[in-house]
């Protein structure tokens, strides 16, 4: 028998983590392979400049120079595919570790053992967070390692900073999914609401510079904490990290409170 809920949860995720890791390496590899054929194409940068301003902000292409490794990675990977992959994983795990166990009628068996509900939430969240950071690390190592073979040289420190912010973005939404799952036990709701919030947060962060009434809400967006300070160029932003950690702490407290107060479906 495994020693703790934490290791048991990680063990249960092993195949999923392996599949996601391989997929992210292949995704990065695809962008690396395409890089030599795109870096000398001025038409790509010209195309971005000719896009309507709102589209440039939505695609994180404002001021991006696709002829540089940083600009290319920022537009092609860090704007959409990277965050989408991490969010899908983190939200899925956040739902599965509580609501998924209830759907499979294993949570009541778990709670029949001498283990408190607070411990259940905290250890399952820790496994979720570690898995999310692992996927971000795999992505970062792939970018630096594979990129070096295609003259797509990226500063390892700045890549690490971007991956830290990417992992925190995933953990925030994973914690939201976990909170909803722990408080309601409804997997569909716990998966759908974080997905909607993620889309809204993305749009608010992207369009706030263009829409005056969105500007006060931009800094509340987890996407602003993720990429608003351009970590791939500027490194780790301390205040953004603190905001993300504080958000996770609040959500985790709500998850514990909700789970402790709720009757568990048998």
Image (spheres, helix red, strand yellow):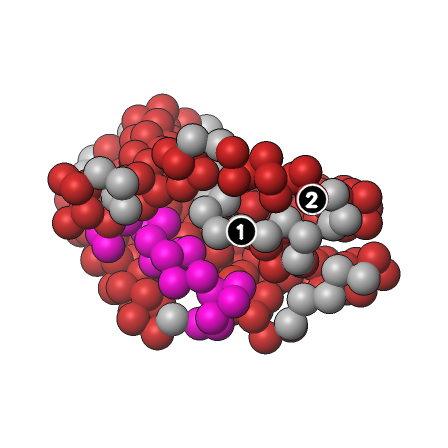
Q: Which residue is mark 2?
A: 42
Q: Which mark is residue 141?
A: none
Residue 70: image location, x then y, percent: 61, 59
| Pick the front one: 133 or 14 | 133
Residue 197: image location, x then y, percent: 30, 36
| Pick the front one: 41 or 172 | 41
Can the viewer see residue 29 in this picture?
Answer: no
- Write the residue at 24% across / 54% down: 219
Q: Which residues are magenta?
A: 219-236
Image: 174 above or below 50: below
Residues at circles 2 and 1 in contact by the CB criterion of under 8 Å: no
- Write the residue at 67% across / 58% down: 69
Image quadrant where one finds the C terminus: top left
Assess disc 2: are there few (<14), some (14-19) or many (≥20) residues with their C-alpha within 10 Å of its C-alpha. Answer: few
Location of residue 91 by image quarter: top left
Q: Secondary structure at mark 2?
A: helix
- Write the residue at 45% across / 61% down: 230
């Amino acid at each position: 028998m495994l020693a703790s809920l934490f290791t048991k949860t990680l063990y249960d995720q092993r195949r999923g983590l392996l599949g996601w890791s391989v997929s992210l390496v292949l995704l990065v590899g695809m962008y690396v392979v395409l890089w030599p054929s795109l870096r000398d194409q001025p038409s790509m940068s010209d195309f971005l400049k000719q896009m309507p301003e709102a589209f440039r902000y939505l695609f994180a292409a404002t001021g991006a120079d696709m002829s540089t490794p940083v600009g290319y990675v920022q537009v092609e990977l860090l704007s959409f595919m990277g965050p989408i992959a991490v969010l899908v994983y983190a939200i899925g795990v956040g739902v599965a570790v509580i609501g998924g166990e209830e759907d499979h009628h294993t949570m009541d068996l778990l709670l029949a053992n001498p283990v408190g509900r607070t411990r259940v939430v905290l250890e399952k969240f820790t496994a979720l967070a570690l898995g999310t950071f692992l996927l971000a690390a795999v992505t970062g190592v792939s970018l630096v390692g594979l990129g070096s073979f295609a003259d797509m040289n990226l500063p390892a420190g700045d890549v690490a900073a971007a991956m830290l912010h990417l992992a925190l973005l995933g953990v925030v939404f994973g914690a939201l999914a976990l909170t909803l799952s722990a408080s309601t036990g409804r997997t569909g709701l716990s998966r759908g609401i974080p997905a909607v919030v993620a889309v809204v947060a993305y749009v608010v962060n992207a369009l706030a510079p263009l829409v005056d009434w969105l500007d006060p809400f931009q800094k509340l967006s987890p996407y602003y904490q993720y990429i608003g300070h351009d970590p791939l160029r500027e490194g780790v932003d301390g205040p953004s990290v603190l905001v993300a950690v504080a958000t996770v702490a609040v959500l985790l407290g709500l998850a514990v409170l909700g789970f402790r107060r709720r009757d568990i479906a048998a």
